[in-house]
Structures are given as structure tokens and as C-alpha cells.
Image (tube, grey):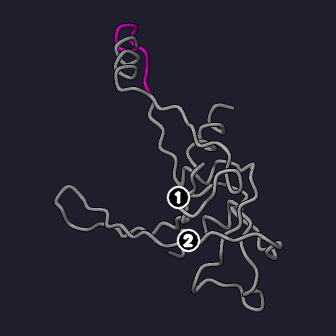
Amino acid sequence: MNLEIESMYSDTVWELVDLPDGVKPIGCKWIYKRKRGEDGKVETFKARLVAKGYTQKKGVDYEETFSPVGMFKSIQILLSIAAYFDYEIWQMDVNTTFLNGNLDESIYMMQLEGFRSPDQEQKVYKLQRSIYGLKEASRSWNIRLMM
């Protein structure tokens, strides 16, 4: 959990602000996962902070959610062309993918239980980057990737 929080602070995912009048912040929660090796034994434990995006309201917290998706057939065609012309293919893996997407909307999220800033417990996070769970997270990542 500490690695995830450190990643969010280093990427300036949010800033701590006073909650504006008439705004209801969304919640957040931790999702835990066990990563297993080829032998089936647990190698690492992962914790990911996700927003409770199901509480977001269209027109208030987000506008658009559409994000294009690649079809498997299109990927097969590209790989066939690359094989025919003997092109090199590189794979890219992006850690904390959605944290790289910028938000256009003003979204406020409650502080994490156990990670609240002392003397600022009444404040909330104003999200500056998308995080997992937000309705527009994949769209903001896609827009950032295509720029």
C-alpha cells in the first residue's frame, strides 16, 4: 500500500484542498491481488487504490467515457505485415497506466482511511490525474497516449 501511495504522491495525482460548497466527494477503496509465479506460488502481493466511480454523475463529475479499443483482427493484420517485411516489434508495459492520464473535470475524492494528513482531516483530494475506477479513466489515458 505504501508503494502505491508513494507512486501517487510522486506523480502528483492529487492535491489536498478544502471541499467547495455543494460538491459531494467520491469515495475510494483498496483492491488487493496476489501475483503468482509459474509454479503457482505467491510471489508478490499488490495493492491498488481505486475510486468509487460508480458514484459519479454524468454532467457533474464526467462528460465523456468513450475510448477506442483495438480489435484482435486488426492486431493480427499488423503482426502479419510486420512478419512479412521482417520489422521489429516492441512491447511496452506501463506501470500505473491510468495515472498518466490528465483530467479535464474537477473531481474530489475523500482522503484515505489511515493515510489522512494530520491537522488537515477535513480536506479532500482534488484529482489532477485519472486513477483506476473513474468512469473517464481509460479515455483520459487514451487521449494522453495519442498526443
Are there few (<14), some (14-19), or many (20+) residues within 10 Å of tag 1?
Answer: some
Task: Tell me the tag on residue 133.
Answer: 1
Q: At label 2, which amino acid type do we have?
A: Cys
Q: Earlier in the sequence, mark 2 or mark 1?
A: 2
Q: Where is residue 113 drawn, in percent x and y?
A: 57, 84
Q: At label 1, which amino acid type do we have?
A: Gly
- Say above or below: 144 vs 106: above
Q: Main secondary structure of the magenta part?
A: loop
Q: Nearer the viewer, residue 129 or 135?
A: 135
Left or right: residue 120 compared with residue 80: right
Q: Helix, strand or loop at disc 1?
A: loop
Task: Tell me the tag on residue 28.
Answer: 2
Question: Which residue is at 82% across, 72% downward?
Answer: 20
Question: Which residue is at 26% across, 62% downward?
Answer: 36
Magenta-tinted stretch: 82-89
- Say above or below: 125 vs 40: below
Q: Quadrant of the C terminus?
A: top right
Q: Where is residue 57 drawn, in percent x and y?
A: 63, 57
- Say above or below: 62 vs 49: above
